[in-house]
Image (tube, rainbow, N blue to C red):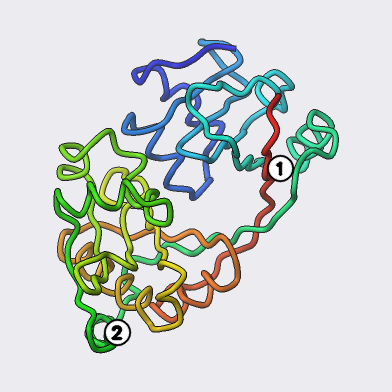
């Protein structure tokens, strides 16, 4: 198994063909993450890791599944198999030390958004809250808090985020309490990460932040990609104008020893 340099990642593109996942695109385009292949020339198996997600493609390969690099993953990693053959290999390798969950792919439809409706959502904030673009100071604050760290965690620092990232937060009494931001980026788009601090949920803040971020993306010619981790996320996405594509299986691996 070999770690691919950026200039060699095109060699595994055919293995991921048709997979509409922007984090895969981020890696293949050389922006974020790492990629491996079973061999450098004419590979038949591949693995991509971006953030806490790992994607497997091509011919199932036990080494790809079992040898997770400790320097680019956290305590938990989400493994996403291309097909049932990879699924069975993951199950065999980790011997029930995993949790199977379902994520939901959302269709990528650039012309589906109703800007007037989104603007209404963005302005429908409860009293005391206001929306703000993520700037250098907010970037620093968000990175320090557990609930919001993933808004910026995949960026090396503020200079990279300023150049390639985009985000909006709801501020209450001077503190960010909800937000929508670019978890990753790729050519002409971002992958949205959205969350709200637990004590400020059920107030429409995620809806407002998501709507404002989508509008910001559209104004810049960027596509705001959405991938839902549960049915609540699907419902929020659909309210913002997205449509469900399909569910897919994900393995949560927390013990890599």
Above or below — where is 226 with respect to 81?
below
Say which of 144 and 134 sits in front. Answer: 144
Above or below — where is 26 with respect to 62?
below
How far from the left and from the top, in percent, is residue 72?
48, 26
How far from the left and from the top, in percent, is residue 81?
67, 40
Task: Count neighbours of disc 2 (C-alpha within 10 A) and say few if under 14, some if 14 to 19, many if 20 or more.
Answer: many
Instruction: Assign the N terminus to one quadrant of the image.
Output: top right
Asked which secondary structure carries label 2, the reply is helix
Tag 2 residue: 121
Say which of 183 and 12 sits in front. Answer: 183
Residue 83 tag number: 1
Q: Residue at x 15, y 42 (%)?
A: 163
> Total label count?
2
- Give the residue furthest to the front: 173
Above or below — where is 211 with respect to 31?
below
Going by the image, does 220 lie left or right of 115? left
Task: Count neighbours of disc 1 (C-alpha within 10 A) and say few if under 14, some if 14 to 19, many if 20 or more.
Answer: some
């Amino acid at each position: 198994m070999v770690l691919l340099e950026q200039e060699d990642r095109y060699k595994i593109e055919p293995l991921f063909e048709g997979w509409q996942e922007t984090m895969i695109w981020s890696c293949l385009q050389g922006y974020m993450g790492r990629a491996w292949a079973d061999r450098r020339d004419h590979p038949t198996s591949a693995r991509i890791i971006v953030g806490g997600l790992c994607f497997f493609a091509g011919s199932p390969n036990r080494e790809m599944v079992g040898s997770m690099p400790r320097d680019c993953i956290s305590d938990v990693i989400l493994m996403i198999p291309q097909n049932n053959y990879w699924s069975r290999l993951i199950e065999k390798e980790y011997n029930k030390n995993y949790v199977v969950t379902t994520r939901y792919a959302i269709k990528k439809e650039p012309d589906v958004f109703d800007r007037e409706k989104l603007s209404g959502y963005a302005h429908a904030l409860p009293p005391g809250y206001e929306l703000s673009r993520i700037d250098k100071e907010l970037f620093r604050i968000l990175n320090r808090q557990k609930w919001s760290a993933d808004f910026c965690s995949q960026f090396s620092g503020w200079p990279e985020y300023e150049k390639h990232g985009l985000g909006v937060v709801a501020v209450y009494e001077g503190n960010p309490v909800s937000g929508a931001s670019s978890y990753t980026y790729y050519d002409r788009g971002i992958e949205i990460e959205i969350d709200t601090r637990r004590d400020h949920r059920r107030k429409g803040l995620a809806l407002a932040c998501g709507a404002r971020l989508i509008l910001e993306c559209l104004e810049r010619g960027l596509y705001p990609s959405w991938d839902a981790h549960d049915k609540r996320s699907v419902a929020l996405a659909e309210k913002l104008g997205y449509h469900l594509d399909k569910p897919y299986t994900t393995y949560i691996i927390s013990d890599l020893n």
